């Protein structure tokens, strides 16, 4: 609000300058004056950009983002609109603390992928009742103590309901499968990975909850973050499988 008077003054000044230039009787002088006026506007605009934005820093961010496969940076851990990358994926990997927000928000995508892509969906969530869960609850808020383990149990029930809805009279082998695995200490970021080609990575920084945290939308590049995310997920999944902490939802 404080900048509005300044903007009005600038606009009035520009209009006054343009009017003065067009009031000049000599065409050549008018043309030269207008050219100088435009040049000064461009120089002033460039100076403003340099002042407001560090160009070397911006270029470094753009270059490194491309190298790492960071397509977009989102200020929260959720995306309100539908995720076609997830709905049309044949392989979906999800890693989260409880998975409660992701599973509830992405019901349509999960069911569509099961029905139409016979998707293999693997969900890695925390071991209920583990020290890790207790630590996250305590870090987030005193009001969160005792809430995450019940969320994990409810997520299992939700996924079973989604699988039943996707089945809807079909033979079980005609739709995809859902597997749930558990970890205890491995989480670094919450992940959604679709077909090795697209990913969503949310920073986990309690006491801030993941749903409110910065997220990166990732695409595949030779040495990018998506490749690291896939490797991390697979290592955690192997641990869960080797320790008999994986089961199929059906």
Image (cartoon, rainbow, N blue to C red):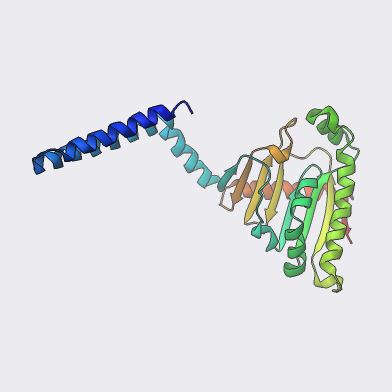
Which of the pair 190/233 is nearer the observer? 190
The mark total stands at 0
Which residue occupies 40% across, 27% down? 5
Residue 20, image x, y percentages: 19, 35
Residue 175, by quadrant, is: bottom right
Which residue occupies 28% across, 34% down? 14
Which of the pair 209/234 is nearer the observer? 209
Inspect this view and state whether residue 105 appears: yes
Note whether 249 is above or below 203 in the view shown: below
Residue 110, image x, y percentages: 76, 59
Q: Is residue 112 left or right of residue 48?
A: right
Which of the pair 129/184 is nearer the observer? 129
Inspect this view and state whether residue 44 appears: no
Residue 35, image x, y percentages: 19, 40
Q: Is residue 84 left or right of residue 67?
A: right
Residue 153, image x, y percentages: 90, 47
Residue 195, by quadrant, is: bottom right
Q: Quadrant of the C terminus?
A: bottom right
């Amino acid at each position: 609000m404080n900048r509005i008077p300044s903007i009005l003054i600038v606009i009035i000044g520009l209009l006054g300058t343009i009017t003065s230039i067009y009031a000049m009787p000599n065409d050549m002088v008018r043309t030269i004056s207008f050219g100088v006026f435009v040049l000064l506007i461009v120089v002033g605009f460039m100076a403003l950009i340099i002042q407001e934005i560090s160009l070397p820093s911006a270029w470094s961010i753009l270059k490194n983002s491309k190298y790492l496969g960071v397509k977009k940076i989102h200020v929260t851990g959720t995306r309100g609109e539908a995720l076609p990358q997830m709905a049309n994926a044949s392989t979906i990997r999800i890693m989260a603390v409880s998975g409660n927000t992701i599973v509830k928000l992405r019901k349509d995508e999960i069911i569509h992928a099961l029905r139409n892509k016979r998707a293999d969906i693997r969900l890695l969530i925390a071991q209920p009742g583990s020290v890790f869960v207790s630590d996250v609850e305590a870090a987030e808020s005193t009001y969160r103590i005792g809430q995450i383990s019940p969320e994990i149990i409810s997520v299992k029930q939700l996924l079973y309901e989604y699988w039943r809805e996707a089945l809807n009279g079909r033979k079980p082998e005609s739709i995809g499968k859902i597997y749930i695995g558990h970890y205890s200490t491995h989480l670094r970021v919450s992940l959604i990975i679709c077909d090795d080609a697209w990913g969503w990575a949310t920073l986990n920084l309690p006491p801030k909850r993941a749903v409110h945290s910065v997220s990166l939308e990732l695409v595949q590049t030779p040495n990018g973050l998506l490749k690291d995310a896939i490797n991390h997920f697979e290592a955690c999944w192997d641990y869960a499988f080797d320790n008999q902490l994986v089961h199929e939802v059906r």
